Image (cartoon, grey):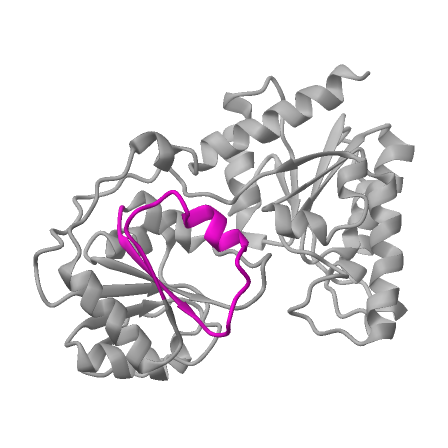
Amino acid sequence: MRASYWYENLESVLDCKLSVITNEKNAENDNIYYVNNNKTSFLSKLIHDKGVAWKKSIFYFLQGNNKIYPDLVIITGGPFMHFGLSDFFRRKYNSKIILDYRDPFSNNPIFQNSRIKKMIKSFFERKFNSKADAIITVNKYCAKLIPHFYNKKNAIIQNGYDESVELSCINNIDKLPLKIIYAGKLYFSLDNIAHAIRNEECVLTYMGADYKNVNSTNSIKNKGLLSYKDTLEQMQEHHIGLIQSTAYKHQSTTKVFDYIRSKLIILVVLNKKSDSESSLKDELKSFPNVFWCNNNANSISNQIQKIKQHKYIEIDNKLVEKYSRRNQMIILKELIEKLIDEN
């Protein structure tokens, strides 16, 4: 969605012509080239990253293509190993290279890699980044985990929300029962949350890729995997946006920006004791209608009770607009202009 938004909108703020190479077959059109990941590589046994083989597929595609002559290339991941195409783009086209890390690679604590695997990934990541002209990522905690980030031109660009998708009216918080929505991947069991919402006579709606692991009950509605537009429409019918948060500082979640835009009350459930700072805390610190609790039924119930007594505080629209994908894309535009001006 990050790359798709840039493709659809970057030309509106920057004098450029865009082409895309993707493994998404349904996206193919005149300027979007589908390249199947159909090659093999011995490195795949050491690094389970789809970019290992896809790099070879892209290389052979470009060798036979005479339509793409990029002045600048943005390579986005993960997967990450196709970042190694930087050398090829530089040699063949004299392109400027921006590497876009949506997550950390070798230093990602979520992966829990062995020491050897981390060393192998780190070797490639440092090589990739040393060849880049600029590096971007989604928050400052990810940046600290990416080698050479601060030695290069760089930018923090959040995923944000898609402001081009219009919203319907937002529900009145006085209407009961409280309706809670969770949109996205599940990071831990819903058991404690389910117990609390039953006790507090709330209703939870789930939608996302983990829908097969969510059982529908009287208090939990499972909507399955919906489109972005349909997910936003569902948000407008709820009072509270639920977030499951892990103890990792760098881990944010795109859904928080859609909750912010929808002006929902936000309930954050922490699975573990967290640090005093994190990306999620940074993103939410300026917003008044946010409640935090631990992942146990009593703690969740207590915060829901507080929400029932809470008088909703209107949010400054300028603060909300900061997280639109368009405003975040302007940061990318400015970075590209700096790189091009160097020539």
Compared to residue 95, the image places residue 189 above or below, namely below
Residue 60 in sight here: no
Front-most of residues 325 and 75? 325
Q: Is residue 196 left or right of residue 227?
A: left
Viewer-proximal residue, 142 or 339?
142
> Is 306 part of what is drawn in magenta?
no
Q: Relative to residue 258, is residue 15 depicted above or below? A: above
- Percent across and percent down for residue 145 are 72, 54
Point out residue 307 in the picture as x, y percentages from the top left corner: 20, 61
Residue sitting at x 21%, y 64%: 306
> Total number of numbered labels?
0
> Which quarter of the image is occupied by the C terminus?
top right
> Residue 111, located in which quarter of the rendered image?
bottom right
Tell me which residue sits at (53%, 52%) in the image: 279
Left or right: where does residue 197 sit relative to residue 126?
Answer: left
Residue beneath the point at 51% across and 47% down: 1
Rendered location of residue 335, percent (x, y):
66, 27
- Specify whether residue 19 is in view: yes
Write the residue at 53% across / 32% down. 329
- Picture quarter containing residue 319? top left
- The residue range painted magenta reads 263-292
Can residue 289 be found in the magenta stretch? yes
Relative to 44, is 258 above or below?
above
Residue 313 lies in quadrant: top left
